[in-house]
Structure formats: C-alpha cells, structure tokens
Amino acid sequence: MSDFGGAIKKSSNYELAVIGVPFDEKSSYLRGTAKGPAAIREASTGAMINPCTELGVDLALDTVLVDLGDISIKGGFFRLASRLEEKITEIINAKAVPFVLGGDHSISYPVVKAFAEEIKPLDILHFDAHPDMYDEFKGDPYSHACPFARILEEGLARNIVQVGIRAANSAQRKKAKKFGVQWIEMKDLSKKMSLEFSNPLYISFDIDALDPAFAPGVSHCEPGGLSTRQVINMIHKLNAEIVGMDVVEVNPDKDVSGITASAAVKIAMEVMGKVVLSIQVK
C-alpha cells in the first residue's frame, strides 16, 4: 500500500509528486534495488505511520501529495532516461516538487539533467558513502558509480555538496578538487553543522549514507556512516529552496525487518515537510 501515512491523494493538481523508478541494471555488484520503490511505498502505509512530520507539517492536510506510479524501464537505460527526463520536466512545469524513489543511483543523472534544463542555477546536496564520480566503472560510464561524473562534466549544477563520504579513491578526490565539489566526510562531520544554499536545491539521497546499523538493506555496506537522527537534524536545519529529491539504493533483499525502507520513508517525509513550510512562507 502506498500512501505515505495516509497523505496520498488522487488529484490532477498537486504540490508534491512521488515517482518510482524500479531499475537496477546499472548496479555494479548486487541486484535488488529495482524492488526499492515498492518496498519504500509498502513501508509508508498509513496502517503503520501517520502523515505528520516532526516540524509540524501534516502532509494529508497541509499539501496535495500524489503518487504518479512507476516509470517504464523497458528498452534499457537510455530509453528509461528519456522517459524520466520527460516526466520530471512535466512535474516541474506543473510547479510541483518531484520525489523520485529508486532504483540504483544511475537514475539521478537523467533526473538532474531535466532539472538543469528548467532551473538555473541549480545546487545539489548529495548524501552518500561514495562520491559516485568514477569516469567509468567496469567499462560503463553510466554505472551507478558514475552519475556525478556525468553531472559535473556537463555542468548541470552550480554547486555540489556531498555529505557522508567515507569510501573515496584518489581519482575521485582529484575530480572533486578539479570541479570544486565540497565534501563533508564522515571523519570531519560536526555536530553543529548546518547547510545553506543560495540557489534552488536538489537532494540526492543514497540510503547507504546511513550506517549499516540503521540501513542494512543496501548492496554496498560501508560502516561508519550517518545515523538516521543525524540526517533528520541536518534536514531540519537546512536553509534552502528544495525543488526535488531522489532516494535511491534501497535493496529489500538485504533489508532486516524493513528498517531501511522505513528510514527512506522517514527521510523523504521530513524533506516533504520542509518543502511545504517553504511553500507556506511564499
């Protein structure tokens, strides 16, 4: 059941839109993240949680949230990318904010590409254990290990901040320095840290940014990560106009009691709450 605590409505006029991308063909290790959108939706059921966020926003009463279903993945990555760009553009032109449920992280590249066509300049806040900036991985430049290399090379964002990094090689460090990407590595994380962006902000959240203790349902476990509480606190302190978000790399085959999917729901809903508050202020 997909209802985000009972908040999902059926309406052609909406402010927030959920889209699923059940695609994991660009995963470099284990498959399974194609089941992520279904797992996240199941964990969002109003039979278990309510639609209220911690900042006091009731997603059932204070906004119109719809679920637009899943993007077809037939025809491979490039056909999928084209469909995804078209759908994201449609949502942006409807003056709404898309929340994309993955799927592996390769999908972030076409999503950001659509944003970059419609919103300039664009900033990106990327939560991840990995920078995902390989030039190519195992011969594939569109691997889920590469989306931010493509985003950087094409100049799709003005500023990129990556939080939670703890598995980066020297080549990725050089690329980050070359393009001026700001890393907030786990070893440097400050308890008092707050993030501020001057341009419209897209958030890309790889669930393995969380420590495996909080999110075991991932294909690439990397100990030493963020707690769910730390992420929520960062979201609450975030000073930015949020225009979209993806939550990727939930692998239900590796999950324990659905806690990874539940974390994805919680984080997405807190970001939704921030978006609603910003709309109310306008």
Image (cartoon, grey):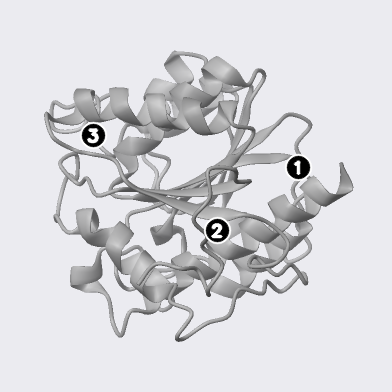
Q: Amino acid at mark 2?
A: Met
Residue 186 is labelled as 2
Residue 272 visible within the image:
yes
Location of residue 31 by image quarter:
bottom left
Query: Does residue 225 appear to the left or right of 223 in the view shown?
Result: right
Q: Residue furthest right?
A: 281
Looking at the picture, how far across and down is residue 198, in whole percent? 79, 31
User: Could you say which is closer to the camera, residue 138 or residue 57?
Assistant: 57
Label 3 or label 1, whichever lies nearer to me, is 1
Q: Secondary structure at mark 3?
A: loop
* Lower position in the chain sequence, tag 2 or tag 1: 2
User: Could you say which is closer to the camera, residue 131 or residue 270?
Assistant: 270
Q: Which residue is mark 1?
A: 240
Q: Amino acid at mark 3?
A: Ser
**CA separation in Å, label 3 and label 2:** 24 Å
Query: Does residue 126 appear to the left or right of 259 in the view shown?
Result: right
Q: Residues within 10 Å of mark 2 (few under 14, many from 20)?
A: some
Q: Which residue is mark 3?
A: 143
User: Could you say which is closer to the camera, residue 188 or residue 242?
Assistant: 242
Q: Amino acid at mark 1?
A: Ala
Q: Quadrant of the N terminus?
A: bottom left
Q: Secondary structure at mark 1?
A: loop
Q: Are marks 3 and 1 in contact (CB under 8 Å)?
A: no
